[in-house]
Image: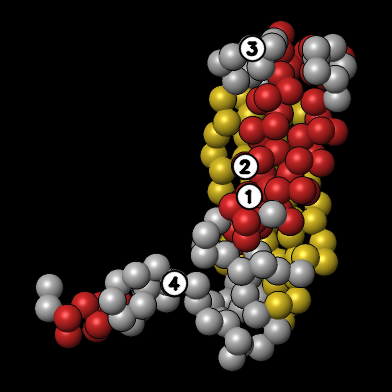
């Protein structure tokens, strides 16, 4: 690929400079708007593990509360974990860890909201990922084969690219 071909190709890749090096996108010219993202994950386990967690019988203590708190803390640390993410002022972080007997396991959902120049999809995805990892860590003494599944963006609102919903 010639330099000219690369420059044409890379114009649509906002995280690459003219030399193909990773860069943080300059969002200083964008308007600060309200943006929200919702992400989800599933944590699947054996029925016995699920029953023990539901009964509060996990060796490490409050599995669900610790998982929820870890997700909230992780959303606030996203820019420290993902190299090209902007540090954002987060106005809302909600992490729900909901029992799902039919899995058996838990559904995790995070909603993150800001008023900024860029979106919060990565913060919501980081929140559910770390909440799921924490749930695993808190319950691994009961079961090593716990599965973290289907980490995904459910929806996002605000920003230049417009709204997105998983059904889109």
Q: Which of marks 4 and 3 is in front?
A: 4
User: Helix or strand or loop: what does disc 1 sit on?
Assistant: helix
Residue labelled with disc 3: 143
Residue 23 shows which numbered tag? Answer: 4
Q: Do the residues labelled 3 and 2 touch (CB within 8 Å)?
A: no
In this picture, is 61 found above or below 25?
A: above
Percent across and percent down for residue 138 are 73, 23
User: Helix or strand or loop: what does disc 3 sit on?
Assistant: loop
Q: Nearer the viewer, mark 4 or mark 1?
A: 4
Q: Distance between the residues labelled 3 and 2?
A: 19 Å
Residue labelled with disc 1: 126
Q: Please name whichever residue, 99 or 14, is drawn nearer the observer in this view of the structure.
A: 14
Mark 1 Cα within 10 Å, few/some/many (few <14, many 20+)?
A: many
Percent across and percent down for residue 90 are 77, 65
Q: Distance between the residues labelled 1 and 3?
A: 24 Å
Q: Which image quarter holds the N terminus?
A: bottom left
């Amino acid at each position: 690929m010639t330099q000219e071909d690369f420059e044409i190709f890379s114009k649509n890749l906002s995280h690459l400079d003219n030399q193909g090096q990773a860069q943080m996108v300059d969002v200083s010219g964008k308007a600060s708007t309200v943006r929200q993202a919702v992400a989800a994950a599933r944590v699947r386990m054996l029925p016995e593990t699920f029953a023990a967690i539901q009964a509060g019988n996990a060796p490490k203590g409050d599995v669900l509360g610790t998982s929820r708190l870890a997700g909230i803390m992780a959303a606030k640390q996203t820019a420290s974990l993902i190299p090209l993410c902007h540090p954002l002022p987060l106005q809302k972080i909600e992490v729900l860890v909901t029992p799902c007997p039919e899995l058996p396991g838990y559904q995790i959902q995070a909603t993150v909201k800001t008023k900024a120049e860029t979106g919060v999809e990565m913060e919501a995805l980081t929140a559910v990922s770390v909440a799921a990892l924490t749930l695993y860590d808190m319950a691994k003494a009961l079961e090593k084969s716990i599965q973290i599944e289907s980490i995904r963006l459910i929806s996002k609102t605000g920003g230049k690219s417009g709204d997105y919903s998983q059904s889109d």
